Amino acid sequence: MTTPNETIRAGLDAHERAKSSGGKAKLASLASAPNTIPKMTELRQVVFLARNRLSAIRTAAVEAMRKHREKVEAEYGDLGWVENENGKGRIDTLGASQRKRMIDGAIRKFQKEQDAKTADERATLLDGMQDAKAALDLVRDSWQSPVGVLMRGTLGSAKRATYAANLANAGPIEVNEAIREAVTSGDKELAAACCVRIDAMSRESRQSLSFTKSDVAEVLIGDEYAKAIEAIGLTDFAIAQGELADREARAIAVSPDEKIGVGLRLEDLKKRLGKNFDKDGNALDENGEPVVPANETEAERLNRLYPVRYRGDPNGGSDGRPVDGGGNGNN
């Protein structure tokens, strides 16, 4: 079974694949749903690489089209003009509308040729992104709330069952004490048993408690929950960015509202997590400086430093250097 990560990797250039020897074995471990924080984080990192590659293709395509348009307009600019008989002016034998049709036709032909050069790679990257989204959809509902994560994580635990039996008839005072013990010791099974008891208590008894289920879950698994929400949210954001980049690379119009909508996803995530990210979803510290990920590979470093321009030439630039819009390595 091909995982989303393997599908995306297949779309990256041979240079990166060569540097990632043994990568297939590593990615094979992600064949199951990304139901752990490390798996979600790794999936997000690989989707970022794919998004960056699509952005690079888009940047190169837009620049190539700009240069080609200038060339075509210059070539056709004087075509069809002849000197007037008295030498006092020129006559346009083509006419503005015919000249425009000829220019548009030449540009469409060039665009079609450009699309064909990167079609297979773009299709592979987009397919991989959709596979990544499908994989996240398998676990997305499992991370709806900290309480749900706490309860699911201890489901079937014999220790939790024992705690629940001992708390079956506990009142508010006993449950408060049990919650304090669970939080102090980091005992998730005891915390989950307290939540089970709280659900069974009367409304009046619950109102006598000093803590809610949300309080307990937030303290014990809040950090883990935030990491999962960050990984899922950033992956969704990068997929949306990659899809827009592919359309722009093919000269398909992207409305301002669509771009704003993608940007608002990141703004919502910032508010939800209380963290800061740059426009590409890379973490920033309190000073607005990039946060360097732990165990960062050279390929990931280049993509972080040059998120759009890295390997911008669809036909080259695989030596790991940042490239300009024409695919020439910067010196």
Image (tube, rainbow, N blue to C red):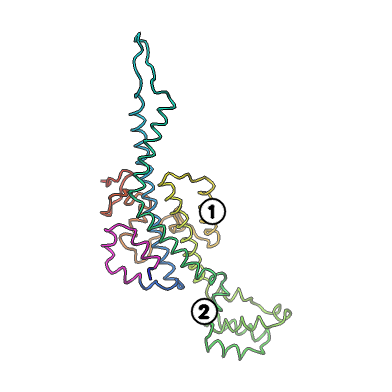
Check disc 1 and report the residue beneath it: 264
Q: Position of residue 251 (x, y in %)?
A: 43, 44
Image-quadrant location for residue 82: top left
Q: How many marks?
A: 2
Q: Residue at x 42, y 67 (%)?
A: 41
Q: Quadrant of the N terminus?
A: bottom left
Q: Earlier in the sequence, mark 1 or mark 2?
A: 2
Q: Main secondary structure of the magenta part?
A: helix
Residue 9 belongs to the span the image colors magenta: yes
Q: Position of residue 38 (x, y in %)?
A: 42, 71
**298 and 97: which is toward the camera:** 97
**261 and 198: which is toward the camera:** 261
Q: Residue at x 35, y 56 (%)?
A: 303
Image-quadrant location for residue 292: bottom left
Q: Secondary structure at mark 2?
A: helix
Residue 316 belongs to the span the image colors magenta: no
Q: Which mark is residue 153?
A: 2
Image-quadrant location for residue 131: bottom left
Q: Position of residue 162 (x, y in %)?
A: 56, 90
Residue placed furthest toward the top: 86
Q: Position of residue 86 (x, y in %)?
A: 35, 8
Q: Secondary structure at mark 1?
A: helix
The answer to whether the residue labelled 1 contacts the one labelled 2, judged by CB atoms less than 8 Å apart, is no
**264 and 220: which is toward the camera:** 264
Q: Could you tell me the amino acid type at mark 1? A: Leu
Q: Could you tell me the amino acid type at mark 2? A: Gly
Q: Specify the segment rendered in magenta.
A: 3-27
Residue placed furthest toward the right: 204
**91 and 209: which is toward the camera:** 91
Q: From mark 1 to mark 2, how far is it between C-alphas?
A: 32 Å
